[in-house]
Amino acid sequence: MKRIHFSWFILVITFFSIIIAGIIRSSSGVFIVPFEAEFGWDRSMISLAFALSLFLYGFSGPFMAALIEVLGLKKMMVYAMMTLIVGVFLTYFMDQSWHLIIIWGIIIGLGSGLFLTVLSPYVANYWFEKRKGLALGILTASTATGQLILLPLLAYIVENYSWRWAISLILIVSSFMFIIIILFMRNTPQEIGLLPYGRTEGSNRSAKTNKNNPITIAFKTLKDALRVKEFWLLAGSFFICGLSTSGLIGTHFIAYCFSFGITVVAAASLLSFMGIFDIIGTTISGWLSDRYDNRWLLFWYYLLRGASLVLLPFALMKGSFTLLIIFSIFYGLDWIATVPPTVNITRQVFGVEKSGIVYGWIFASHQVGGAVAAFAGGLFYKLFNSYTWAFILAGIFCLLASSFVLLIKKENANISSENVHI
């Protein structure tokens, strides 16, 4: 019987680590209403704290990639998960609005930065030679799935017990994951005497330790990337990606549904339902990104997402559960399917060695978009007592993103034969 390559075990550990980090960060959507009710905080202020979290975890991406080069993968995962655990624990003791900003805006924002930005492409690039796109698709799926999968349970606990009990569940699962990382995670295949999955003896490229200052590394790479048109196109489209996913849906979908009389548990269940289809859609996207023009994949992803976001307000206004299910399926399939082709194009344009940090900066723009939508959604609700225009405008922006990606030069977007692994 053929032994399973250790790279797949690393993928499983990474997959669940990302899911836990996603659960922690996305649980903010469940806590908006109870925080508002218990502490009397204004919704726009709560949205500001969660927007800061999105902004910081996005902008920490390139520095996290640089720190991996300096400290190693395992040590960075241990530090990041420990930071998340500390932030979750401190939530028990907050009673001022500035506490929320420090804990959920800064601590949890920075703690989730590694897991939800550059970890997936780093593991895919250095632990896999074949099936790299598939591995990336699976890991990317965990990013959104983690943000959705436990939301119904957390919402049920909040609704029937207390938000503090929901925090306790998060603390337990994150502590368990912390132990798994310490015991079983490894930095590179070479550390345990292996080559990445699918690599022959003829090639021995491995992750190199960089002793330079990680801040210097991150900004020098950004300076080089800013000279390349493809960086601006990818960053611009990813800004809209963040605006239309974690920033708007991840933060305000539950509250939007609640304003139409849908219970928190039912709305969270719809998000979890999207998570199931996200696993399917993003994994398939990884498989497709190894085989087809990544520009056209992104074009269709953004186009379909925009259409689904415009559909959502009409589904809620009509009170049509059927339309909500249709929205959940199509949006779920497309939730984070944009990541594998975006990472592929980044790798093809900038090379494997620089792609992790460059993608970190591209993802930073994703989170700027997310932060804008998280704050603007709360502001729209405060001004108009409705989220409707926020969702319609996000759909229109997605149509704009679909045009951005087609401006990328075809010779850069096409997959060369050396990147195709079947």
Image (cartoon, helix red, strand yellow):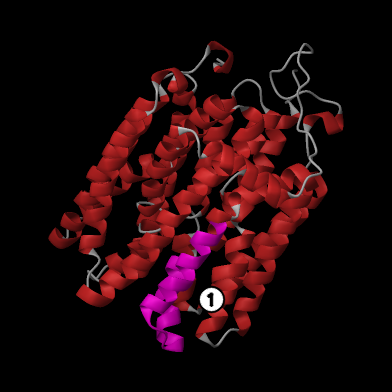
Instruction: Give the residues drawn in magenta, as a range.
Output: 28-57
**Which quadrant is the C terminus positioned in?**
top right
* Depth check, front residue: 291 or 145: 291
**Chief SS of the magenta region:** helix
* Depth check, front residue: 124 or 330: 124
**Residue located 50% across and 84% down the image:** 97
- Residue located beneath label 1 in the image: 101
How far across and how far down the image is residue 115, in percent? 61, 50
How far across and how far down the image is residue 59, in percent? 55, 55
**Residue located 78% across and 23% down the image:** 195
Q: Which quadrant holds residue 178?
A: bottom right
**In the image, is residue 77 above or below residue 258?**
above
* Depth check, front residue: 216 or 235: 216
How far across and how far down the image is residue 284, in percent? 44, 29
Using residue 111 as the reference point, say whether residue 148 is left or right of it: left
Residue 155 in view: no
**Residue located 60% across and 55% down the image:** 60
**Which quadrant is the N terminus positioned in?**
top right
Using residue 384 as the reference point, say whether residue 136 is left or right of it: right
Q: Which quadrant holds residue 186?
A: top right
